[in-house]
Amino acid sequence: MMGSGARFLGPYYLCHFVLILSYPLARLYAINHKGLRGGLVHTVGEVESWEKQAFSLLGIVAVVKFLKRQSLDSFFADFFLYMKVAIVVLAFVLDVRIFSWYWMVYMVMFVLLQQPRYSGPSKFVHYTPASLNEATKLDDGVSRLIEFHAAWSPPCLHLEPAMAELSLKYTKEDFKFGKFDVGRWPFVAKTYSISTSAMANQLPTLILFKGGKEVARIPHVFKDGSFVRGRYRKKDIVTGFDLDGKSKLQRSGRKGSKKDSKKKNK
């Protein structure tokens, strides 16, 4: 685990950048040393044609992923994946032996290198099953946005920096951020209609509790158990849970809580 920016200097990122920079050397080896005798192409022109198509497509995908990113962590994870696909395809075109070398390196990286988790500043309350049960039933005028996550889930890992930033910006006396690990306590997930299956795409699940009741969640789950796939960009979370307090319901709720507190003080 690494802090705010230091995690991008860890082995996961450095090894991927080295892997990317290795392609020009592999290309040079296949062309000058082997003479393009072990692949699908036999001229430099054919190589350049394949590269133009692969890197043009990669560039388009990279731009789209960057615009739709949850965080830099999610962008780099997607970028590295598509870059590795592009390189291994080009390696196969250049020389089958180079392709096999890359494939072995990929397997080693997959086993040994895990993307580091964000561990920078945040204002989360970390819940246990008992404290979660108590917090979600409290009617104390405090809204609680709780992230149900699992350590093994890449989408949860990618959302951490964004949620930490939101917790620092929007935490107030009447609005708190919390986290609960359904990977550690999966039996609790059923209580909140959350599937922890990797195929279900319901992790992370963000639920807003207010007045002892659930008032909103991402992704939204219908009564029949079906759900709408969640959108987890910061602006989607801000809008979905009205973190800026722009809705009439949110404003009236805050006014009501202030009036109640004044009455109690009297």
Image (cartoon, rainbow, N blue to C red):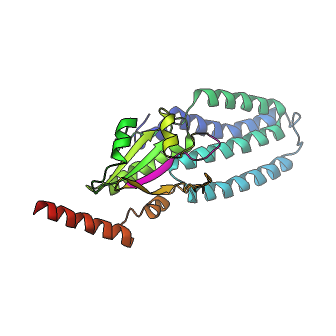
Q: Is residue 228 left or right of residue 240?
A: right
Q: Residue at x 72, y 32 (%)?
A: 102
Q: Is residue 238 visible?
A: yes
Residue 39 percent location from the top left of the image: 87, 37
Q: Is residue 32 left or right of residue 113?
A: right
Comparing 137 with 87, the one in front is 137
Which residue reaches farthest bottom? 248
Q: Identify whether 97 is placed above or below 141.
A: above
Q: Identify whether 106 is placed above or below 53.
A: above
Q: Is residue 78 left or right of residue 250?
A: right
Q: Which region of the structure is painted magenta?
A: 198-209
Comparing 215 with 80, the one in front is 215
Number of callouts:
0
> Quarter of the image containing the N terminus?
top left
Q: Residue at x 15, y 64 (%)?
A: 263
Residue 94 percent location from the top left of the image: 82, 39
Residue 89 percent location from the top left of the image: 78, 42
Residue 45 percent location from the top left of the image: 85, 50
